[in-house]
Image (cartoon, rainbow, N blue to C red):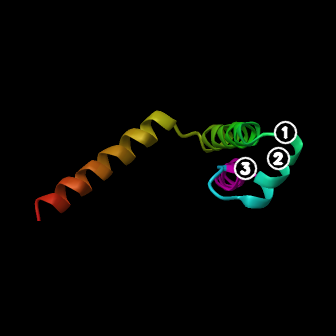
Amino acid sequence: MTKQEKATLSLMIALFLNPMGFDIVQYVLISLTGSLFGANFVLYCLAVLFFGLYFYYSSKNPITVFKNLSSRTFQSIVKFINK
């Protein structure tokens, strides 16, 4: 498996584990941990792990990615407002 394939796989897993409505995984984790907080904590930790692996395997700097994304979003908002 190439580095780029590992990066893509890590990003896909991170996005899946990000706890925003993954009911089956959430239910199983609540059953195992006994609490909603514990289940959410596990999912967030796994998501952070796989987002980190994505940035590691893709050789991208997360700060640069965030900066560029923020800049483009801000420019889009300003452009929309000035229409």
Residue 24 in magenta stretch: no
Question: What amino acid is found at the position of numbered circle 2 in the picture?
Answer: Leu
State the extent of the magenta-drawn residues as a range: 1-17
Marks 3, 2: nearer the viewer: 2
Q: Mark 3 and 2 residues: CB-CB less than 8 Å, in contact?
A: no
Q: Mark 2 and 1 residues: CB-CB less than 8 Å, in contact?
A: yes
Residue 14 in magenta stretch: yes
Determine which residue is flagged by label 2.
Answer: 29
Disc 2 crowd rating (10 Å Cα; few below 14, some 14-19, many 20+) is: many
Pinpoint residue 62: horizontal percent, then vertical percent: 51, 37
Question: What amino acid is found at the position of numbered circle 3 in the picture?
Answer: Lys
- Pick out the residue farthest to the left: 82
Picture quadrant where residue 9 is located = bottom right
* Cα distance between the residues tagged 1 and 3: 29 Å
Q: Secondary structure at mark 1?
A: helix
Please state, as top left, top right, bottom left or bottom right, where the C terminus lies in the image.
bottom left
**In the image, what residue occupies the spot 62% across and 54% down?**
20
Pinpoint residue 35: horizontal percent, then vertical percent: 78, 40
Determine which residue is flagged by label 3.
Answer: 6
Determine which residue is flagged by label 1.
Answer: 33
Q: Secondary structure at mark 2?
A: helix
**In the image, what residue occupies the spot 82% across and 46% down?**
29
Q: Mark 1 and 3 residues: CB-CB less than 8 Å, in contact?
A: no
| Residue in front for this viewpoint, 46 or 27 | 27
Pinpoint residue 51: horizontal percent, then vertical percent: 63, 42
